[in-house]
Image (cartoon, rainbow, N blue to C red):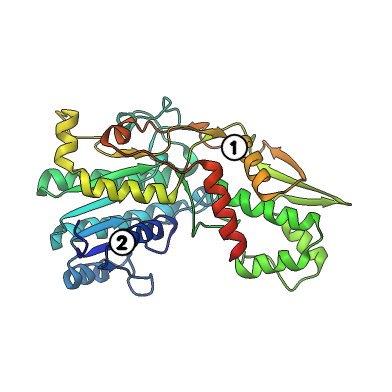
């Protein structure tokens, strides 16, 4: 990519897209194409076609997606498969039609089988059944990756796919009705800490800044306490207890969004589809995506203790093992990425500290 190349970042306001924008701007790229949802509806085929015809971007980062945690994935199964498939179909197809030089498609580690060997290698894709709770989302992402491969093979495009591990960072989703585990832990412990200190003004202000459906910030203190209970935050006399979903035993890997952005830009500049196929010596072209992660994980219980330490919450933590855990372990094998010359550099504790400071400042 040249500094004045036209670069379209689809989903530039989200966790991933905003990180890519920040990193590109830091590196001096000055011709970024950014469109909000109100300016460009990525679900609308005609609107996307018109955008590509008019703008003709040189490069595309496809970071737009409908995302969420276990609850959201399992509840809104139809929206997750329809919206994600529609968005990526539109962007990938019209990237080819308009002559985009290179596209990078962002998937998710949930594409791998539920009982996948650990750590998960790229070649493990489609070797067994998927985790049920996020199967529609995973199938959409697999479809996007296969679409990139298919267009490359038939049309000679240079569309590459990356599969990031669990992400966190600035602009994360803290909505307690649909957030992933790490931002949910940060917000719940922040709220629980304020409840311990009877800081109801602080709790109200938190919900004013980040509204959650069903929480009335104008209600009484007792009504606020009742609302917090819906999210596992309980008060009994002077004690506060935080009850978290699952057993706490599943293990997860977490990557800061800045590290992901750096990896994506590195791959966009240094790696193309033909190189990937040649390097792997593939007779049948498949599994050409590249895992992006840190190569180490921790249990959700260990993660909770780390967040507790950083947020300063001193109350009790309990686990509700009647709620689903999801896949037991999802650790990516990142040896291919490391061998290409990139390695993540932000430690989990360092990253969570920075994210929590940002959370409190907004």
Question: Which residue is at the front of the view, 156 or 33?
Answer: 33
Q: Quadrant of residue 333?
A: top left
Secondary element at image label 2: strand
Q: Is residue 164 left or right of residue 325?
A: left
Please give the name of the residue rendered at 82% of the width and 60% of the height, measured from the top-left corner. 198
Residue 263 locus on image (x, y percent)? 33, 46
Q: Which residue is mark 1?
A: 300
Q: Is residue 319 left or right of residue 257?
A: right
Please give the name of the residue rendered at 32% of the width and 71% of the height, measured from the top-left corner. 40
Question: Which residue is at the front of the view, 51 or 306?
Answer: 306
| Residue ranking furthest to the right | 237
Asked if the residue under mark 1 is in contact with the one under mark 2, i.e. CB atoms within 8 Å, the reply is no
Q: Is residue 163 left or right of residue 67?
A: left
Secondary element at image label 1: helix
Question: Which residue is at the front of the view, 349 or 57?
Answer: 349
Q: Which residue is mark 2?
A: 9
Residue 335 locus on image (x, y percent)? 33, 30
Q: Which mark is residue 240?
A: none
Disc 1 crowd, CA 10 A, few/some/many (<14, 14-19, 20+):
many
The reply to whether residue 336 is in sight is yes
Question: Which quadrant, please, contains the N terminus?
Answer: bottom left
Residues at marks 2 and 1, CA–CA distance in whole angstroms: 32 Å
User: Which mark is first along the chain, 1 or 2?
Assistant: 2
| Residue ranking furthest to the top | 117
């Amino acid at each position: 990519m040249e500094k004045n190349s036209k670069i379209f970042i689809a989903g530039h306001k989200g966790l991933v897209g905003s990180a890519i924008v920040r990193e590109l701007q830091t590196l001096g790229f000055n011709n970024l194409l950014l469109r909000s949802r109100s300016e460009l509806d990525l679900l609308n085929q005609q609107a996307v076609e018109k955008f590509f015809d008019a703008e003709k971007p040189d490069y595309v980062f496809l970071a737009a997606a409908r995302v969420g945690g276990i609850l959201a994935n399992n509840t809104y199964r139809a929206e997750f498969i329809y919206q994600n498939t529609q968005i990526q179909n539109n962007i990938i197809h019209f990237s080819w039609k308009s002559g985009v030089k290179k596209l990078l498609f962002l998937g998710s580690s949930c594409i791998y089988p539920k009982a996948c060997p650990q750590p998960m290698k790229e070649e493990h894709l489609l070797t067994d059944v998927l985790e049920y709770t996020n199967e529609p989302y995973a199938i959409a992402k697999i479809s996007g990756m296969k679409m990139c491969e298919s267009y490359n093979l038939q049309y000679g495009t240079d569309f590459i796919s990356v599969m990031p591990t669990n992400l966190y960072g600035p602009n994360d989703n803290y909505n307690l009705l649909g957030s992933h585990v790490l931002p949910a832990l940060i917000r719940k412990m922040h709220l629980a800490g304020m409840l311990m200190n009877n800081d109801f003004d602080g709790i109200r202000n938190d919900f004013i800044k980040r509204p959650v459906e069903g929480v009335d910030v104008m209600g009484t203190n007792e009504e606020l306490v009742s609302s917090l209970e819906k999210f596992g935050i309980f008060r009994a006399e002077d004690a506060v207890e935080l009850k978290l979903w699952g057993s706490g035993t599943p293990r997860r890997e977490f990557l800061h969004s800045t590290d992901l952005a750096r990896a994506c830009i590195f791959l966009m500049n240094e790696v193309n589809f033909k190189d990937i196929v040649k390097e792997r010596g593939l007779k049948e072209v498949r599994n050409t995506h590249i895992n992006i992660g840190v190569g180490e994980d921790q249990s959700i219980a260990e993660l909770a203790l780390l967040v507790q330490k950083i947020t300063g919450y001193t109350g009790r933590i309990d686990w509700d093992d009647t709620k689903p855990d999801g896949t037991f372990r999802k650790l990516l094998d990142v040896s291919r990425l490391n061998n290409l010359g990139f390695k993540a550099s932000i430690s989990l504790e360092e990253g969570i500290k920075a994210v929590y400071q940002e959370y409190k400042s907004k």
